[in-house]
Amino acid sequence: MFDITSLIIFISAALALIVSPGPAVLFVIARSLEQGRVAGIVSTLGITFASLIHVVFAAIGLSALLMKSALAFSVIKYLGAAYLIYLGIRALTTKAQAANVQEVEPVKLSTLFVQGFIVNIFNPKTALFFLAFLPQFVDPSRGSALLQIIVLGTIFLVMALVSDSMYAVVAGTAKELLLGSSGVSLRMARAQKYIAGTMYIALGITTALSGNSRLK
């Protein structure tokens, strides 16, 4: 179904983007610092379940669009490439700051799952990201676009789940390291923004230059 080279590029790009934490990861860290590793992992599961729903809707919508018009699908790919480049430029130009994680009141694990789900399901940037990122690796000549997007989305979600769970474990077992040194945190934030920004721009440019070759 997938060209091995494209799959390797997808995994590499996804990994680089996943390691750069956003609001959802900071939510996981906050819960882990307050209630421990289990709380952080449960929060991660809620976030991941919401992302899965975003992937399914993106897959259904994009595959339906491709069936109606290859040109329209191509336009979506170009818009997605432009959006990724925009994200990269914004990441590189935004001043890096040490994570400011605030304490939160202990709550039930079931509530943490729901909170994590809500944090991500109502985040329009998450849906927009999947609409921009996943189509760049879809090749209609290799089979069902719907199945390809679901598989790619699942790979991305599993990688994100592992990464976010690692944040939860680290936050739950090394509070002093995360909260005690703003210098370390700031250096990590700078490195992450350059990695993510570069990957966003590189992926967007590569897609834009590749044109519609996959749709012919």
Image: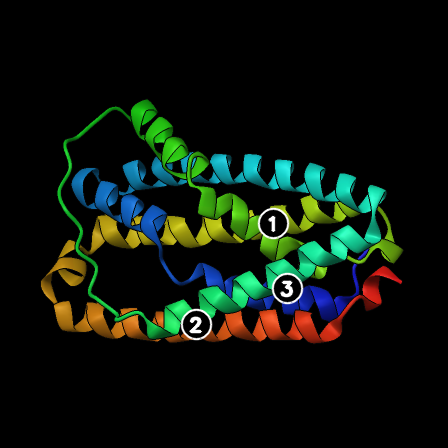
- Asked whether, in this view, residue 125 is left or right of residue 207, the answer is left
Q: CA distance from mark 2 to mark 3?
A: 20 Å
**Image quadrant occupied by the N terminus:** bottom right
Image spot of residue 76 (x, y percent): 68, 54
Question: Is residue 182 placed above or below 160 in the rendered structure?
Answer: below
Residue type at mark 1?
Leu
Image spot of residue 74 (x, y percent): 75, 58
Report the number of discs. Answer: 3
Residue type at mark 2?
Ile
Q: CA distance from mark 1 to mark 2?
A: 19 Å
- Asked whether, in this view, residue 41 is left or right of residue 196, the answer is left
The residue beneath circle 1 is: 131
Local secondary structure at mark 1: helix
- Asked whether, in this view, residue 216 is left or right of residue 164, the answer is right
Question: Is residue 205 placed above or below 30 in the rendered structure?
Answer: below
The residue beneath circle 3 is: 10
Image spot of residue 165 (x, y percent): 39, 48
Counting residues from the start of the chain, the first of labels 3 and 1 encountered is 3
Tell me if mark 2 has few (under 14), some (14-19) or many (20+) residues whose alpha carbon lies within 10 angstroms of its own.
some
Residue type at mark 3?
Phe
Q: Nearer the viewer, residue 125 or 150?
A: 125
Point out the frontmost of discs 2 and 3. Answer: 2
**Point 71% across, 44% down: residue:** 62
On residue 33, the disc is: none
- Asked whether, in this view, residue 160 is left or right of residue 166, the answer is right
Q: CA distance from mark 3 to mark 1?
A: 15 Å
Counting residues from the start of the chain, the first of labels 2 and 3 encountered is 3
Residue 3 picture quarter: bottom right
The residue beneath circle 2 is: 89
Local secondary structure at mark 3: helix
